[in-house]
Image (spheres, rainbow, N blue to C red):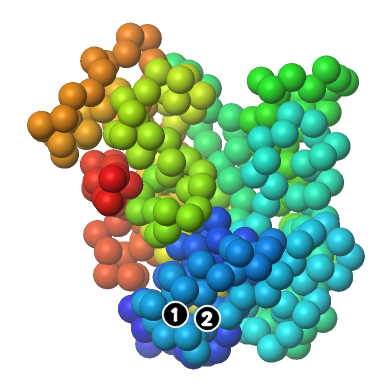
Amino acid sequence: MNYDLKGKKPAIPIGSKVLVTGISGYIGSHVADQLLQAGYCVRGTVRDEAKGKWVKELFAGKYGGSHIETVIVADMAQTGAFDEACKGVTGVAHVASDMSDSPNPNKVIPTVIAGALNALSAAANEPSIKRFVFTSSSTAILIPRLNEEFTITTDQWNDPAVAAAWEPPPYTLDRAFTVYAASKTQAERATWDFVRSKTPPFTFNAVLPNFNMGTILSPRQSASTGAAVKTVYETSQVEEIAQRYGPQWMVDVQDTARLHVAALIDPDVENQRILAFAHPFNFNEVLTCLRNLAPGKSFPPDMEGLGRDLSRLDNRPGAELLRKFGRKGWVGLEESVRDNIAGS
């Protein structure tokens, strides 16, 4: 165990099995990796056999085959989707979501809500489960606002995104990010409503990460936002990516995963929305990092008019949890960029 529990017992026993839904994804794979490092066994859900194959190969090579298994959940929105997967585990990290970038709210939002509630319902019926962590998103609180000073708190919800996502058609591509934000907002709200109304026999926490970057564990995964930095490094095509993602806060994906582990095992972390916001950044700063890390490689000049994310928040609670892993706090931007391009 690489986590300082201050003399207390972990909320779930070391060596027990934890379910990680969406284990083949960028965040899900790192949650599994950190759990395995901490001495737990992992059962991961995948949508098909091909994803399960490389996931097992990856983690069996690092930790041994007896510590990792996968099960196929082809449709998380189907009633009872996670019933079998939850059997015999002590904790659940529900990371799976709809990452299709569809601008149609009818195709995204009901699926994400149903998947979260199916995982909660299955967990509530399994007496061995003592902890449940939901992977939410910074977008459940807000969509970044350029050059505007305001304060972010864990009491906030992204109601404007929900309203905008459910506006009538046409469902043009520029609505995709708003639909994603609404799916995270409505799904996380539904999880808290479930916990309040059903009072399940486990402790519930949510982790809300902003823009994830850092190590990509396998070339066989799309790596979500992690692919953006790698693409800039390999192709120098930065303007479209900078426009798509814009200035916001970043977090190293390993820190996001560590916070999931803390939410699963730390007896002092209960009923919390944990903000995974490390540092505000824009892609000019990413270019600066790349120039420092690869001085012999040519990159485009800085872009004009990118602006800044001027929002304020208290990210000390997350940093304090990371220190329990023996870390100094949040991983810095340049370190995360370095890890992101490793192997390119």
Residue 88's x, y, as percent? 69, 88
Number of marks in the image?
2
Q: Residue furthest top?
A: 304
**Disc 1 crowd, CA 10 A, few/some/many (<14, 14-19, 20+):** some
Mark 1 sits on what residue? Answer: 60
Vertically, is 148 above or below 315? Answer: above
What's the residue at 59%, 63% (across, down)? 51
Q: Inspect this view and state whether residue 272 appears.
A: no
What's the residue at 33%, 29% (across, down)? 235
Q: Quadrant of residue 217?
A: bottom left
Between 122 and 321, the one nearer to me in the picture: 122
Give the residue type at disc 1: Ala
Between 233 and 143, the one nearer to me in the picture: 233
Residue 25's x, y, as percent? 55, 56
Vertically, is 321 above or below 36? Answer: above
Mark 2–mark 1 CB contact (< 8 Å): yes
Residue 154's x, y, as percent? 58, 46
Mark 2 sits on what residue? Answer: 68
**Disc 2 crowd, CA 10 A, few/some/many (<14, 14-19, 20+):** many
Disc 1 is placed on an element classified as helix
Q: Inspect this view and state whether residue 64 appears.
A: yes
Q: Residue furthest left?
A: 296
What's the residue at 72%, 34% (across, down)? 102
What's the residue at 35%, 49% (across, down)? 214
The mark nearer the N terminus, 2 or 1, is: 1
Disc 2 is placed on an element classified as strand
Vertically, is 173 above or below 25? Answer: above
Relative to residue 336, is residue 175 drawn left or right?
right
Which quarter shows the N terminus? bottom left
Give the residue type at disc 2: Ile
Task: Give me the C-alpha separation between circle 2 and circle 1.
Answer: 7 Å
